[in-house]
Structures are given as C-alpha cells and as structure tokens.
Image (spheres, grey):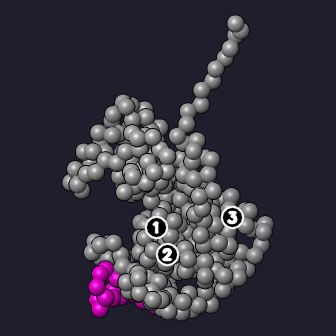
Amino acid sequence: AILNLAEEAGLPPGAFGVVTASRANTPEVGSALCRSPIVRKMSFTGSTAVGKSLYAECADTVKRVSLELGGNAPFIVFDDADIDKAVEGAIASKFRNSGQTCVCANRFFVHAKVYDEFAEKLAKRAASMKMGHGLEEGVVQGPLINEKAMQKVMRTIDHAVASGAEALSGGERRADLKGYFVEPTVLIGATHEMGFSAEETFGPVAPLIRFESDKEVVAWSNDTTAGLAAYFYTSNVHRAFRVAEALEYGMVGINDGIVSTEVAPFGGVKESGLGREGSREGLSEYLETKYMCFGGF
C-alpha cells in the first residue's frame, strides 16, 4: 500500500521499494542491506541495541548513517513553574501512546517545594484517564504492544514499590480488559538511585523524584547514556536558557510537553542516535556536498 501511494504521489517506479521479511529473517535482511555497496545510506528508528548492531555492519562500506534510537527523557518541574500547565504537559509527554514513544518522559524530577501539589494533581489526572479499545468513546489509554512489554512495566513498578516508592494512582494491570493493559501509574517517593536513569520504561509509569537545586537536577538528568528529549517547566527565562543549554539532549521542551514537529530537526545525542529527521537538516542527511574548483577554460 505504501509503495502504491508513493507512485501515486509522483515518485518514479523503482525509486521507492519495499522489502518484506519474517521476524526470524529480519536480521539477515538487515545485514545484507547494511553490507551492500549499492546501498549508500542507512536510516534506522528503533532500539539502541539494534541500532548499534546496524551501525557496526555499515562500517565495512563506510555508509552514511542516521539513527533515531532509545530515549530516557527527564521531565523537570521547578519551584516557579505553573503547576497546572506542568501537569498537562506531563500527561501529554508521559501517557501519549500509553508511554510507548522514544520521547515520552521517563523520569520526573519535581522541586521539593511543589512536589506534593504536583503529585496530587498528576495522580488525579492519571486516574481519570479512560482505558479500553481505541475506537470506544472517551478512551485515551490503550494497551501495551505485547505481553513481554507488559511484564517489563509491571517489573518496573514492583521493583520501585519494593524499594520504597508508593503508587499514588494506578500500579496494576487491568485483567478485565482484553489485551495488555497497565493502569496509568504515578509513583511518589521514587529516588534517582532506583535505576530509572538506566533503562527506558516504555510504558505508562511516572516516577516522581524530589530535588532541591538546579545543579542537582541537571546532573541527575544527564546521568544516562541516552540523550534524545528532555522537558522542563519554569517561569524564569534566565533559568530556561541556562538549564536548556546544560541538558545533554538533542531536543528540549521548555514549558511544553510535545517537541515533535515535521518542521524542526528531530534527533538525539550520546547513545540516542546520529543525525536528524525533519526540517532541512533531515533532507541534508540524504545529500552529499561536492566541491568543484574550476581553473578556467
């Protein structure tokens, strides 16, 4: 269907192709494309582990590579933030697609002065989100992609609770719904040491970690191998520029929980990938610069 649409849009036959493969054969197909001297560019969106493998396989032919890999987005709420707007931004950033996007907030750092207020309001909003089939009226939360993903999310919740966190809302799977549903969960009493910075949850879990200073929260935010997206809320423009520049991420949302747009360069730093998608920077990833020096005729 995509191939037919591409040709209907005006692409010449043969300019766009689709290669299908079974799950078992996908690594072999991917390896063949990466190692082929005919293919001059490889772009991949997916897990960091698979991205590293493809990157290595492209080395023999020195391909140009674009990688959009995993994230571990911090969401920071400073003491001067508009709490209601921060809550709405958190809902948009954390619970879109049930937490299953690479730019979803993964760790919430909330200043001690506003921690309780933010936690209460976020938990109330999360608890009000209707779960179910996406075509049903009022449903805003769907299932996780498979049982393995659901088990991973539940392990994350269980480990946090066993380590001292508390589920202010959610925390359970919905066995009464057909599919792999986990309730939108807000955890209070979470700490930086619980390991959220080491792994992307990829599910509807919002651990709230208390912080005291800008220096502390920036250090915690950067304490990860990922560097795709970050978010923070503040009413101080000087803090906004200072913190945005200090965060080691390819994209930073300032008083906004959604950073994705086709007109802006999308991509990360560190192990979140290489290159950019979208905007003219995204087009540049598929072009080569050629210098021609004319000495006269």
The mark closer to the camera, 3 or 1, is 1
- Examine the image and state in which quarter residue 163 appears: bottom left
Question: How far apart are labels 1 and 2 at the CA level?
Answer: 8 Å
Residue 117 at x, y = what percent?
Answer: 62, 90
* Position of the N terminus by quadrant: bottom left
Name the main secondary structure of what is drawn in magenta.
Answer: loop
State yes or no: discs 1 and 2 in contact (Cβ < 8 Å): yes
| Residue drawn at (41%, 87%) of the image | 136
Label 1 belongs to which residue? 101
Task: Please indicate, yes or no, whether residue 193 appears anywhere in the rendered image.
Answer: no
What residue does disc 3 label? 243
Name the disc covering residue 235, or none: none
Q: Amino acid at mark 2?
A: Arg
Query: Which numbered disc flags the more N-terminal residue, 3 or 2?
Result: 2
Secondary structure of the residue carrying numbered label 3: helix
Q: How many marks?
A: 3
Q: Nearer the viewer, residue 165 or 152?
A: 152
Query: Would you place residue 257 above or below residue 242 in this image?
Result: below
Range of residues picked out in magenta: 164-183
> Between marks 3 and 2, how big is the CA–CA gap?
25 Å
Q: Residue at x 29, y 81 (%)?
A: 179
Q: Nearer the viewer, mark 3 or mark 2?
A: 2
Q: Amino acid at mark 1?
A: Thr
Residue 151 locus on image (x, y percent): 29, 76
Instruction: Please give the label number shown on residue 96.
Output: 2
Reply yes or no: does residue 177 show up in magenta: yes
Query: Does 177 appear above or below 95?
Result: below
